[in-house]
Amino acid sequence: MPVTEAREFLRRRRGAHAGRARILGRLADVGSDTSASASRSLRCPAASGSGSSWPPAMAEKGGVYVLDEPTSGLHLARRRAAAGLLDRLVDSGKSVIRHRAPPAVMAHADWIIDLGPGAGHDGGRIVFEGTPADLVAARSTLTGEHLAAYVGT
């Protein structure tokens, strides 16, 4: 049963199922659907968050979410929904760290820390730290080059 259909099914039954319906609503918010994807395992813990509102514990300040490729396997429309959800976390006072983000997500970031200069034993040093616009302007790393190509400068 698709997540949205299951949510409505449980909503109609109310009572003890209300919490389950809320969690299914959160899964829909973070882009989980009936297809299997590697990133679902990352979105499920975020969706289950604490409290009764989404994003989790909105009234509480602080907190850090570290996500490894949170938009992997998502259709573009679902990527936008997931980005909006992460923005709400940041707006509520949380810090969101995204690891290995595609250019569309990097362009949307507040701050980028680029490690390199290569991968594996050739990496591990900070080669850039700043805003996406600064990274595009500097074009001093491979990430900067890819991001500049994405934004068309």
Image (tube, grey):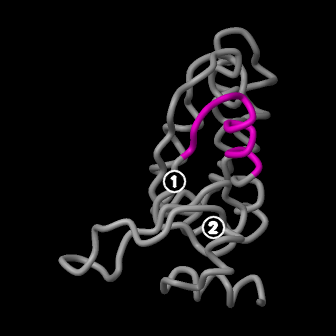
What residue is shown with label 2? 106
What residue type is disc 1 on?
Arg
Highlighted range, magenta: 84-96
Residue 40, which numbered label? 1
Quarter the C terminus occupies: bottom right
Among the 4 quarters of the image, the one containing residue 104: bottom right
Q: Residue 51's x, y, as percent?
A: 63, 16
Instruction: Indicate yes or no whether the magenta region holds residue 33.
Output: no
Instruction: Answer few, some or many: residues within 10 Å of disc 2's Cα (few below 14, many 20 plus, some between 14 and 19).
Output: some
Image x and y of residue 136, in percent: 66, 79
Residue at the image point whose x is 52% and y is 27% from the top: 63
Chief SS of the magenta region: helix
Q: Where on the picture, by quarter, is residue 103?
A: bottom right
Residue at x 63%, y 26% (from the top left corner): 56
First in sequence: mark 2 vs mark 1: 1
Q: In the structure shown, which secondary structural element does the residue marked by tag 1 occupy?
A: helix
Q: Identify which amino acid the numbered label 2 is placed on.
A: Met
Query: Which mark's residue is nearer the viewer, 2 or 1?
Result: 2
Q: Residue at x 51, y 39 (%)?
A: 65
Q: Is residue 82 above or below residue 135?
A: above
Percent across and percent down for residue 112 are: 56, 61
Residue 113 is labelled as none
Q: Position of residue 61 (x, y in %)?
A: 63, 20
Q: Residue at x 52, y 55 (%)?
A: 98
Q: Is residue 93 magenta?
A: yes
Cα distance between the residues tagged 2 and 1 = 20 Å
